[in-house]
Amino acid sequence: MKFLKKNKNNKKDTMHKVELGSLYDINKSLIENNVVSLTEEEMNEKKQMIITFLEDTDNHYYMLLCNDRKDYTVFHHLDTNIECLQDVLIDECLPNRGKTKSFELTENKDAIEIWLSIDGESYCYYFFPYDSAIIEC
């Protein structure tokens, strides 16, 4: 982002460049400073979102990934027990990592974006279908 600033000494306008960082950095800062953790009741409401997401994407493998932390978990989803995966994600995986601050379906509906607070810092995790990366022989 650039802006003009008046220089009082020589009455000449000068151009200054301000680095705001990436969109990810801005979102991270907003989450850290302005968003409180979701309550247990709010997290339970998110379980339906996961079930709908699993039904819509219809994969057998899913990944929970945080690139910043080099943290990933691969889930093998069995069609017979769709509730198991959503329970493991909401009740075990996320709480074992940190406090959930945001949990939303991405705009193109191909992943769930989850922001967690871990030791006072916010991290973005993505939960997404992973069948295309698994090779079974």
Image (cartoon, rainbow, N blue to C red):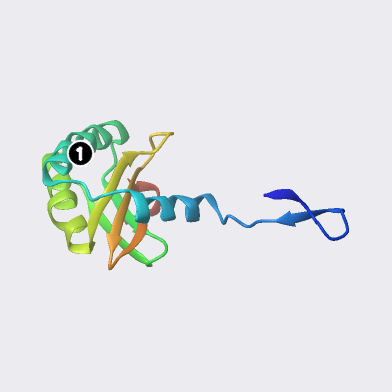
- Mark 1: amino acid: Lys
Q: Quadrant of the C terminus?
A: bottom left
Element carrying mark 1: helix
Q: Can the viewer see residue 126?
A: no
Give the residue drawn at x 26%, y 45%: 60
Residue drawn where x is 44% and y is 50% of the image: 27
Residue 116 place in picture, x, y as percent: 29, 56
Q: Is residue 102 left or right of residue 14?
A: left
Instruction: Tell how many labels.
Output: 1
Q: Residue furthest front?
A: 9
For residue 7, what is the image quadrant? bottom right
Q: Residue at x 30, y 65 (%)?
A: 120
- Residue 33 vs residue 14, the one in the foreground: 14
Q: Is 129 above or below relative to 94?
A: above
Residue at x 17% of width, y 49% of height: 90
Q: Which residue is mark 1?
A: 46
Q: Nearer the viewer, residue 122 or 32?
A: 32
Q: Can residue 89 be seen from the camera position used here?
A: yes
Residue 131: percent from the left, percent from the top?
34, 47
Please tell me whether residue 114 is drawn above or below residue 79 in the rendered image.
below
Residue 13: x and y in percent read 83, 51
| Label 1 Cα neighbours within 10 Å, binned few <14 / some 14-19 / many ≥20 | some
Q: Camera-side residue: 27 or 88?
A: 27
Q: Position of residue 94 (x, y in %)?
A: 21, 56
The answer to whether 25 appears left or right of 62 in the picture is right
